[in-house]
Amino acid sequence: MIGYPGLDQVMVGGHGLWRAGIAVHGASGYSGSRRSAVGAVSRAAHLVRLLDASPLPGAAGSFPLPPKLTVTYCHGGEGFSAVSDRCEIGVGVRATPGFGARAAEDLVRAAVSELDALLSTPRPTEVTAWAPGRRTGPA
């Protein structure tokens, strides 16, 4: 639990324990091409929807906050005419005593598996978990 000053009140929250960078792959190409393929940015957007819809348990025990999954960044594509073959998203999960790092990783990997089964691509989506003790999260 942490407290920090807000504009009108002291904000209270809990930092996540589990973080990951996710590299989503897709077919590259030209946006006006005849060939129809799902690019990495579109696949990443679908993954974000899957993650946002993932069920998380409520608050339990003496820890007052429930687990929370947040997509923290999305980087991919460049320009209007190029279909990107890679898009990176970041995920942070507030873990709790009843929903730890293993459960968080399992949840994210399940969403990634669902994405890869639904919108296949020659290269699978990669999850790189953030190692506690590092000063920064995944790149």
Image (tube, rainbow, N blue to C red):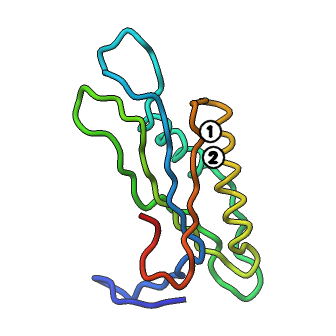
The x and y percentages for residue 80 are: 23, 30
The x and y percentages for residue 47 are: 55, 44
Q: Give the camera-side residue of 68 and 139.
A: 139
Q: Separation of disc 1 and disc 2 at Cα?
A: 5 Å
Task: Please name the residue shown 50% across and 60% down the image.
Answer: 21
Residue labelled with disc 2? 112
The kind of residue tagged 2 is Val
Residue 115, which numbered label?
A: 1
> Measured along the vertical axis of the image, is residue 109 above or below residue 123?
below
Mark 1 crowdedness (10 Å alpha carbons): few <14, some 14-19, many ≥20 = many
Q: Residue furthest front?
A: 122
Task: Please name the residue shown 60% across and 45% down the image.
Answer: 50
- Left or right of 33? Residue 12 is right
Circles 1 and 2: CB atoms closer than 8 Å: yes
Q: Quadrant of residue 8?
A: bottom left
The kind of residue tagged 1 is Leu
The x and y percentages for residue 33 are: 33, 13
Q: Give the camera-side residue of 68 and 73.
A: 73
